[in-house]
Structure formats: structure tokens, C-alpha cells
Image: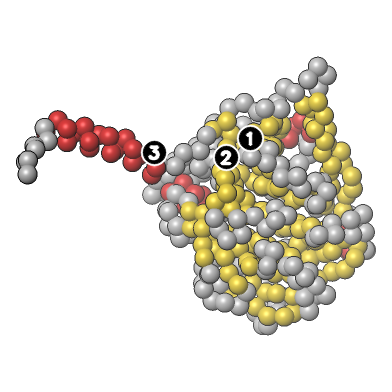
């Protein structure tokens, strides 16, 4: 047998080659898009379709104290959570009052102290987060109390999946902990978790910015980060489908010290998915007053199409909630001159010469 010795320089060559091959497979990067493909080719037309809300003190069916959430069911009925009045109001697609789900304020079975958010189950059930008691309460589509589940950690939002798996958002599980927990209702422990964050997402969660979440018609979950500036899409079982982003310079790492809470110059406000798969991501830019909201649109593959700011199309809006129905119309909550909801249609029209 020949005992061949390998020259010393060859070891260093092999080591360098192995590092070169190893690093790309371990370090995940997201392509930051700097130019919207439609930015100079399409105009955006937004039209108000209807308003829900009134300052009538006699008929309170259309009066809101503090709108904290809006959800749209499969028939395009509109549900509005009024945190101040401790109730959810239901309206038909034309904005006409249907019914009210009024909650008894308390700590007993079926009672709610402080409703934070809610979602609709596959059979019209209401899953309501009570953040005062840190629990989820389930009501039937007719408003009858069914049961409740205490939560081990605090969550900021929930999505009811197509098979009634509940996806709970946030929870402060440390700098690299998961941001989404999937539960079966009434089971104490999550069946799985996914969408890991980093130091920045954890710091932002401490001051109430847990990112934005929604689902598409197929039950896929979309989570939008403030930082890192990206949107991630997951299948219902928590597997990553794709991730994408566009350049927005105000979305950057959070400055933080032991003496102060983090403050972001811009934060993600909402994310929605159109019926055809396009994605709308809304960013709140608070660097300079008057504050602006940027509406970013991406195609089904995550390619950035175009953006506009709220001063162009929605000058009065200074809200937090953006929701979309199955026709591609979107809904915003307004605070002035009184709390109400507005429904808009949106069209993208090619400019002349394109």
C-alpha cells in the first residue's frame, strides 16, 4: 500500500472550499426589490362603495365606540368588533344591520372583560380573544356561548384556519422564538409553531407591534414583518411557501437600550391577499408629520408591482385596520368625524402608451 501524503496547502484549500459551499446553504437571504414593475405603467383608481357607521345617539345599530377589528365572511357580510361597547355588529354586503353579538362584561363562562380581536370559523362561529382574562371564547354563529380556552402565553391576534385550526400570533418567546402557534381549540398545547423571528421582531413585540397576519382563500398564512422587512407565506401546516420584500429605507433594525423601549420609524400595519393571489402590504411611516401610509402591491409570485401613499387616495385615513373581501374590495376603519367603516373598490388601469 502506498502511503501518500497530502500537501499542507491542500488542507487549507479544502477547508476554504467547504466553507464556500456551506455558507450559502445556511444563510437565508431575501431579494430586496427596488423598482415596482407596474409603477410607471399603471394608474390606481380607488372608489368608495359604502360607509357603515353613524353618530345617531338614538339608533345605536350603526354607532361604534371604538372599532378594534373588522372581519368579512364568505358571503361578504361585515363584522365589526366594538371594544368600547363590548360587542360585535354584523352587517350585510350592502351595509345594512343584521344583528348584534353583545357580550356580558365579567369573568364567568361566556363573559368577556376586554375583547382584543376575533375571527370567524368555518361554520360561522366567533372565536374572540379576551386579553384581560387571556383566553379565547367561542360563540355559535347565532351568538350562543359554547366554550372557552385559557391561554398559557399572551397573543395579539388570531386567524381561524379552514379546518378551524387556530393560528395565534405573537407571544414573546425570545429573540429567535416562533411567532405563530397553531392550536386545536380546547387543546392546551399547540400542535406546531412556525415563522421564527429575530431580535428586532422580539423587541417590536414588546411595544405591541407583532407584525400583520392574514390568510388567503386556500388557508395559506401570510405574515408581514416590520423588520426584517419581508412577507412570508406559509401553507396551513406551517411550511414556508415563499418570502418577498421591497426596499423601504425606514424599515430598519430597531435601536434599543436598557433605559428605553424600542421605537420604529415605520411599522407594518396590515397585510391582505386578493382573490387572484396579489398581496397588499400596508406600511405606516411616522418619520415626518403628516404621517403617511404606503400601500404596496405584489403579484402572486411576490414580485413588487407598485406603491402609493395615503395622501394620494385616502387623505382622511389614519387608522390601523385593513381587511379584504372575496371580491377584492377592501375595508378601512375611520375615527373622524365619528367611528365608522368604509368599503372601497380598487382598479389597476394601464397608462396610455403602455
State the image quarter where residue 166 is shown.
bottom right
Where is residue 294? Give x, y as percent: 67, 36
Image height of 141 relative to 293, above or below: below
* Percent x, y of residue 97: 91, 62
| Mark 3 or 2, closer to the camera | 3
Task: Name the front one of labels 3 and 1.
Answer: 3
Residue at x 83%, y 33% (from the top left corner): 45
For the residues bearing labels 2 and 1, Cβ distance under 8 angstroms: yes
| Residue 332 in sight in this render | no
Q: Is residue 138 visible?
A: yes
Per the image, the residue denoted by label 2 is 244
**Dot label at residue 303:** 1
The location of residue 10, given as percent across then percent down, is 17, 32
Q: Tell which of 64 and 178 is nearer to you.
A: 178
Between marks 2 and 1, how big is the CA–CA gap? 7 Å
Q: Nearer the viewer, residue 282 or 275?
A: 275
Q: Count neighbours of disc 3 (C-alpha within 10 A) and say few if under 14, some if 14 to 19, many if 20 or more.
A: few
Circle 1 — which element? loop
Q: Is residue 316 left or right of residue 114?
A: right
- Label 3 close to label 2 by CB (< 8 Å): no
Q: Name the residue rendered at 11%, 32% in the picture.
A: 7
* Residue at mark 3 to residue at mark 2: CA–CA distance: 18 Å
Q: Is residue 186 above or below residue 9?
A: below
Mark 2 lies on a secondary structure that is strand
First of labels 3, 2 by sequence position: 3
Residue placed furthest toward the front: 1
Which residue is labeled 3 in the image?
24
175 sits left or right of 283 in the view: left
Amino acid at each position: 500500500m502506498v502511503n501518500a501524503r497530502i500537501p499542507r496547502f491542500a488542507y487549507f484549500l479544502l477547508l476554504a472550499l467547504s466553507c464556500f459551499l456551506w455558507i450559502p446553504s445556511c444563510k437565508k437571504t431575501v431579494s430586496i426589490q427596488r423598482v415596482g414593475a407596474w409603477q410607471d405603467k399603471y394608474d390606481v383608481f380607488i372608489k368608495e362603495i359604502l360607509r357603515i357607521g353613524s353618530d345617531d345617539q338614538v339608533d345605536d345599530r350603526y354607532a361604534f365606540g371604538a372599532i378594534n377589528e373588522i372581519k368579512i365572511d364568505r358571503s361578504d357580510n361585515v363584522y365589526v368588533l366594538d371594544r368600547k361597547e363590548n360587542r360585535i355588529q354584523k352587517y350585510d354586503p350592502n351595509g345594512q344591520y343584521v344583528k348584534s353579538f353583545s357580550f356580558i362584561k365579567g369573568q364567568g363562562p361566556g363573559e368577556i372583560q376586554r375583547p382584543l380581536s376575533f375571527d370567524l370559523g368555518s361554520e360561522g362561529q366567533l372565536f374572540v380573544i379576551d386579553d384581560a382574562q387571556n383566553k379565547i371564547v367561542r360563540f355559535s354563529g347565532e351568538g350562543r356561548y359554547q366554550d372557552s380556552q385559557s391561554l398559557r402565553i399572551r397573543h395579539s391576534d388570531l386567524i381561524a384556519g379552514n379546518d378551524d385550526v387556530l393560528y395565534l400570533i405573537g407571544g414573546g418567546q425570545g429573540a429567535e422564538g416562533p411567532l405563530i402557534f397553531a392550536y386545536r381549540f380546547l387543546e392546551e398545547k399547540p400542535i406546531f409553531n412556525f415563522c421564527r423571528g429575530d431580535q428586532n421582531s422580539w423587541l417590536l413585540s414588546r411595544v405591541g407591534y407583532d407584525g400583520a397576519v392574514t390568510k388567503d382563500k386556500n388557508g395559506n398564512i401570510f405574515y408581514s414583518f416590520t423588520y426584517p422587512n419581508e412577507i412570508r407565506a406559509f401553507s396551513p401546516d406551517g411550511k414556508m411557501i415563499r418570502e418577498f420584500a421591497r426596499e423601504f429605507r425606514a424599515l430598519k433594525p430597531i435601536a434599543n437600550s436598557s433605559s428605553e423601549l424600542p421605537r420604529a420609524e415605520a411599522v407594518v400595519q396590515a397585510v391582505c391577499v386578493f382573490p387572484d393571489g396579489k398581496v397588499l402590504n400596508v406600511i405606516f411611516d411616522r418619520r415626518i408629520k403628516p404621517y403617511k401610509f404606503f400601500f404596496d402591491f405584489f403579484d402572486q409570485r411576490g414580485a413588487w408591482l407598485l406603491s402609493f401613499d395615503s395622501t394620494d387616495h385616502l387623505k382622511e385615513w389614519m387608522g390601523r385596520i385593513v381587511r379584504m373581501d372575496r371580491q377584492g374590495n377592501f375595508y378601512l376603519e375611520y375615527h373622524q368625524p365619528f367611528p365608522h367603516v368604509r368599503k372601497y373598490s380598487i382598479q389597476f388601469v394601464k397608462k396610455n402608451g403602455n
